[in-house]
Amino acid sequence: MRRINGVLLVLVCCLGSIAAQAHPGGYEHDMAPEMLRIWHNQATGQTVTGAFSHMRKDTVYVQGKRGLTAIPLSQLAPSDKRFAQGISARIHQLNASLFAEVTEPQTSTTAKRPAAAAAFDAFAPKVKTRWDERTLYVESDGLPDHPLMVGITSWQQQVPLPQSYTGSNAWRVPLRPVPAANPLSAKTHFFRGAIALAANGIPIFNALNNRGADSFLIGELDEFGGHCGRADDYHYHIAPMSLQKMVGPDKPIGYALDGYPLYGLLEPGGKPVGKLDAFNGHETPALGYHYHATKTYPYINGGFHGEVTEIEGQVDPQPRAQGVRPDTPPLRGAKITAFAQPKPGSYALTYTIQGFTCKINYRLEADGSYTFDYVSPEGKTVTINYPSRPRGGGGGQGSGQRGAGGGRPQEHPAPEIIPAKPGDFQLTSSVVANGGSLPVDYTCDGSSSSPPVAWKSAPAGTKAFAVIMHHYPPGEAEEPHVYWMIYNIPVATKTVPLNDRAIGERGVNTVNRRAQYAPPCSQGPGKKWYILTVYALSDEVKPDSSVSRGVTRDALLAAMKGKILATSVLNVSYERQSQKP
C-alpha cells in the first residue's frame, strides 16, 4: 500500500504543477484560481473558463462553474489542444507506471559500447557517456568550449550558466530508434525543449521559437547558432557546423532525440547529399535513416522520423535546466559585443544599446549562489545575489524565449538601466519612475486607475502617438499580456492624464478583451515587470479589427509598421500585496 500511495502522490503533484501553468481564473469558485484556464473553441468562437477534467474519444471535458463542458479536441485553439494532450499523456504515463518499480537509469558495464557513443568522444572528458541495452546517456555542464553570445541582436537578457545534465538528469538517446507510424513535424510541434543533442553535450532546440519565428533569421542567435533560454541555459537552434572540426567529417555532429544521427552538409566521405524529406532526413544503404544539416530552414531535423513522446509541447523525458534569476523581457535594440570567462566560475558579458555600453558581470560563490553586477553606461553598479538552485526541481527546458526558467521570484533591476540623454524622446509618469514600483492605486489591489503618462522631444515629422502597456508572464505563454493600448493620439497631445478615456482610440487588452485599461493583477509571488512604450508615428494608423472584437496588439503593431519614427520605454514593477508574506 505504501508503494501505491507514493505513486498516487506523484500523480497529484504532477497534475497540480501542470494546472498551475493555466491562465488565472476569473470567478469565485471552490477551485483554486491557479487550476483554471481559458479554453478557446475556434469553431464556435466561445470561451470556457475551467480546469481540465479528462479527455475521452478526442473530446476534452472542462470542469467549470456550471459543470462539465465537452469540447471536441479538433475545435480547440492550438495552445489549448497541446495543453490537453500533454495532460492526458502525462496521466496515461503515470497510470501505466502505477505498479511498476521506479528506479534510476541503470547503466551497464558489460554491454557492448554503442557506436553512437563515439560521436561524443571528441569532447571527453567534459562530456561523459554511459549506456544500457536501450539508451545512451550523455552528461555535460551545458556550456560549450567555443565563444558564446557575440552577435545576438534580439536579446532576452539571458546569460549562460552551467547546468547539471548529470545522473538521472542526463540526456537520453535511444539506441534502437523505431520509425514512427505518424511522424511529427517541428513546424507544428515541439516548441519547447530540445529536439536533438549536439556532440559537445549542448541541446539543440526547434529552429522556430515559441512564437513560430525563425530564431536565426530574426537575430536571436550568436555566431555559433546558439543563445540562452529562460533558465540561462545555452542551446542551439541551428546545426552547430563548427563541431565537425572536432568530430571529423565522417561522424555525426549530434543525435536527434528519436535516436537517429544528425550529419553535416555532406555525406561521410564528402559526397553530396541526396534528396531529403520534410524532416531533413533520408535513408542510404551505408547509414540507414539519418538527418542532415542544411543552410536554410529547417537547418536541423525538422521533426521526428522516429517515435518520440510529446508532453506539454516537448520531447519527454529530457533533462531539466535550472535557473537562478527571474525572467526578464526582451531588450530592444541591444547587441551583444563580447563575452568572456576571466576565470573559472566568473563571466562577463558586454552589450551596446542606443550608443551606450553596458555590462553584466557574474560569478559563482562558494555557497553555490550567483552574484550579478549590472553595470550602467556611467559605471554605476547594481549588485544582486541569487541563492543557489534547489535540487531536483525548478527550471525546465523552454523555447529559449521568455519565462520563469526555474528562477525563484526575487527583486532584480529594471530590464533597461539606460539614462535618457538631453533631447531624447522620453516617456515618463508623475507617479512612478523608470524602474520603479507602480503604486497600488493603478493595480487590481487598489482603485484600478490608469496611470498618467507624458512624453517629450518627439522627432521631427511626428503626426501621431500610440501607447502600449504589456507584460511577459512566466511560463510558456507564447504572447505577452496586454493591459493598455491607445493609438492615433493627436500630435499636439503630450500627456494622457489619470483615468483618461477620451484621448485617441483604444485597442483591446488581453485580460478581459475590452478596449480599456486593465490593471496589473498577475498571479504568483514575487515582483513582476510591466513595459509601457510610447511610439512616435509618421501618420495615423488604421488597424485591422476584422479578425477580433476590437484592435489587438498584433493588429496595431502591423498597422504601425514602417511608420514608427521613435520609441521610448518606461519599465515599472509590481508585487501583489495579498501575496507578500
Image (cartoon, rainbow, N blue to C red):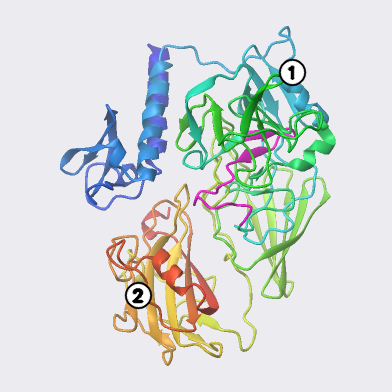
Q: Quadrant of residue 517?
A: bottom left
User: How far from the left and from the top, in percent, is residue 445?
Assistant: 33, 64
Q: Please tell me whether residue 200 belongs to the stretch shown in magenta.
A: yes
Q: Do tag 1 and tag 2 residues touch (Cβ < 8 Å)?
A: no
Q: Residue furthest top?
A: 110
SS assignment at label 2: loop
Q: Three-letter amino acid code at disc 1?
A: Ala
Q: Is residue 406 left or right of residue 451?
A: right
- Magenta-drawn segment: 196-217
Tag 2: Cα neighbours inside 10 Å, few (<14), some, or many (≥20)? many
Name which residue lies at 55% across and 47% down.
Answer: 208
Q: Is residue 125 visible?
A: no
Relative height, residue 501 to residue 243 (above, below): below
Residue bearing mark 2? 450
Relative height, residue 436 to residue 157 (above, below): below
Q: Where residue 146 is drawn, which disc sits there?
A: none
Q: Is residue 149 left or right of residue 45?
A: right
Name which residue lies at 44% across and 60% down.
Answer: 575
Relative height, residue 221 to residue 544 (above, below): above
Q: Quadrant of residue 95?
A: top left
Residue bearing mark 1? 115
Q: Is residue 85 left or right of residue 193?
A: left
SS assignment at label 1: helix
User: How far from the left and from the top, in percent, is residue 67?
Assistant: 16, 39
Tag 1: Cα neighbours inside 10 Å, few (<14), some, or many (≥20)? few
Q: Quadrant of residue 485?
A: bottom left
Q: Is residue 244 visible?
A: yes
Which quarter shows the N terminus?
A: top left
Could you give the CA–CA distance between mark 1 and mark 2, rounded to whole angstroms? 63 Å
Earlier in the chain: of badge 1 and badge 2, it is 1
